[in-house]
Amino acid sequence: MALTVPALGFTFVAHLLGAVSAVLVLVWCIHFRGGLAWEATNKSLIFNIHPVLMLIGFIVLGGEAIISYKALPWRKEMKKLIHLILHAIALILGAVGIYAAFKYHNESAIVNLYSLHSWVGLGAICLYAIQWIFGFIIFFYPGAAPAIRGEALPWHVLFGLFVYLLAVGTAELGFLEKLTFLENSGLAKYGPEAFLVNFTALVVVFFAAFVVLSAVLPAHTEDNMSYTAITDE
C-alpha cells in the first residue's frame, strides 16, 4: 500500500521534538551535572560536552538534514546545499563530541572503547563520514552521470536512514550506560535527574521516528527529489 500522507506535518513535530531534546540535554548537563568545560579539574565537566554535542549536533542536526527536503519550501538546489551543510556540521560536532569523551577518559585514567556504546558509536560516525563523502562526490561535486545518480539514490537514502538510526541507537545506549553509572554511584533511581535522563531518551526515540516518517512519506509539492550535481542548471 502506497504511503500518501504528506510529510510536511510530520516535519513540524520533528522540529519540536528536536528542540525539546536539545533543551533537556542542556538542562541535564548544566543544571544537574555542573556545566561544560574543555579544561577543568572536575573532569566530569569535560565529559558533559560529549552528550551535548552528540545529541544536538549528531542526532538533532543530522535529523534536520534528513528532513530538509520535506521541510523547506525553497528550490531543490538550495535544499541540497542545506542538506549537505547540515550533515557536515553534524559530522564535525559528532567528531568533537567523541574527542571530548576520549579526552575525559584519558585525563581520568579510564580505559577507552570498552563498552558496546563506544564500539557502535565509533562505527556509526565512521559510516556517517563515508555516507557524506559518497553523497558529496556522487550528487554534488563533481557529480556522477544522471543514470548513476538515479541508481545510487535509493541506496543513498536507505543507507543514510540506517546510519542515522544506528546513531540514535548509540545515543540510547549512552543514556542507559551513563545513568547506570550514576545510579551505581548513589544517584536516586526515582529522582528528578534519573527521570530527566530517561525522558530525554524517550524524546530522542520519538524524534527519530518522526524523522524517518518525514523521510519516507511523500513531499507536499511535486518534487521528485531527484539529485543532480550542484553545478547543474
Image: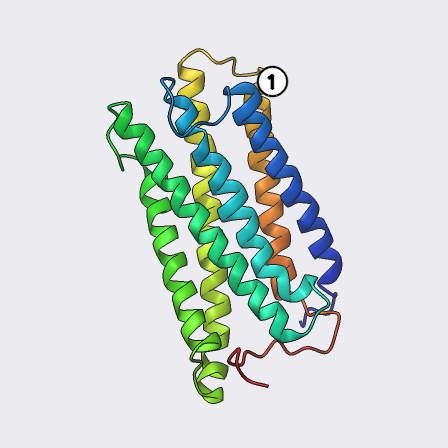
Q: What residue type is labelled 1?
A: Pro
Could you say where residue 80 lies in the image, as x and y percent from the top left?
Answer: 57, 70
Q: Which residue is drawn at 49% across and 48% down?
A: 58
Compare residues 28 and 219 and report the one nearer the observer. Answer: 28
**Residue 226 shown left or right of residue 179 in the figure:** right
Q: Which residue is drawn at 33% across and 29% down?
A: 104
Q: Quadrant of residue 194?
A: top right
Location of the C terminus by quadrant is bottom right
Could you say where residue 116 lies in the image, as x and y percent from the top left?
Answer: 33, 39
Q: Quadrant of residue 137?
A: bottom left
Residue linked to disc 1: 192
Q: Which residue is drawn at 47% across and 62% down?
A: 160
Location of the N terminus by quadrant is bottom right
**Residue 122 shown left or right of residue 90 in the figure:** left
Could you say where residue 155 lies in the image, as x and y percent from the top left?
Answer: 45, 72
Other-residue count near label 1 (Cα within 10 Å), few / some / many at <14 / 14–19 / ≥20: few
Could you say where residue 98 lies in the image, as x and y percent from the top left?
Answer: 37, 41
Position of residue 199 relative to residue 161, above or below, is above
Position of residue 184 relative to residue 168, above or below, is above
Tell how many labels: 1
